[in-house]
Image (tube, rainbow, N blue to C red):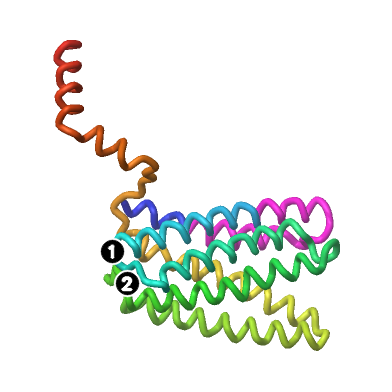
Amino acid sequence: MWLWALLPVCLAVFGTGGIWTVECGTYNPQSCLFSQICNICSVLALWIVLIRFQQVRDYGNHGNANTAGIVLGFIASVGISVIGNFQQSVLMEIHLLGAFLAFFVGLAFFWIQLFLTYRAQPSQDRCWVGPVRATGCILATILVIVMAILARTGNHSGAAVCEWVLVMLFFCLFGLFAAEFRHIDCHRLTVQKQALRDDCSPATIAVNCYVANALS
């Protein structure tokens, strides 16, 4: 189902467009809009992280890298929501915590995904996804380091510019998952394996056939 490829694309387009529409996330009503955009992006990111984990697992890769990827991805997604709901002018400490979770932990998540690009399936688009993802990870790492240095030296304007570019780059990295997601066959949530086995048992099938014949 190639339609699943639209999920990371929607996150990239919605996140980029949403950030462009918000001039300042500190004051009302812009702060309310900024919070909602971050919350929606957080949910979409969580969904993408979970699907990617299941995809790698279904191909037989149950390694620690895949487990670490979903853990870091969940933490980074929560950080996105924290940034949006705790503005810098209100609660600086919590806002910085959210920024650390979103940017630093999120960067670690994308480096793990780069590793999985070359170690896990599907591999049909590896020849171009790998270099593009590697370039994005390298640029993001440079931006995180520069942003931290500028913020520490008191150059908040420069740090804000780096933060904005980093956010745009993260959206692009999330959008790259469309290359893997277009190979998804289906996505199903199963909560009762025993019930599924009972429904497929010969006795259950015979009963269902009997009921169907009686109704007909």
Mark-to-mark CA distance, 1 and 2? 7 Å
The image quarter in which residue 177 lies? bottom left
| 1 and 2 marks in contact (CB < 8 Å) | yes
Q: Residues within 10 Å of mark 1 (few under 14, many from 20)?
A: few
Q: Is residue 69 magenta?
A: no
The tag on residue 59 is 1
Disc 1 residue type?
Tyr
Specify whether residue 10 is in view. Answer: yes
Total tally of numbered discs in the picture: 2
Residue that appears at 59% across and 70% down: 168
- Under tag 1, what secondary structure? loop
The tag on residue 120 is 2
**Relative side of 29 to 16, left or right:** right
Residue bounds of the magenta highlight:
8-37
**Relative side of 77 to 88, left or right:** left
Q: Residues within 10 Å of mark 2 (few under 14, many from 20)?
A: some
Specify whether residue 8 is in view. Answer: no
| Image location (x, y in percent) of residue 117 | 37, 74
Q: Earlier in the sequence, mark 1 or mark 2?
A: 1
Residue that appears at 32% across and 76% down: 119
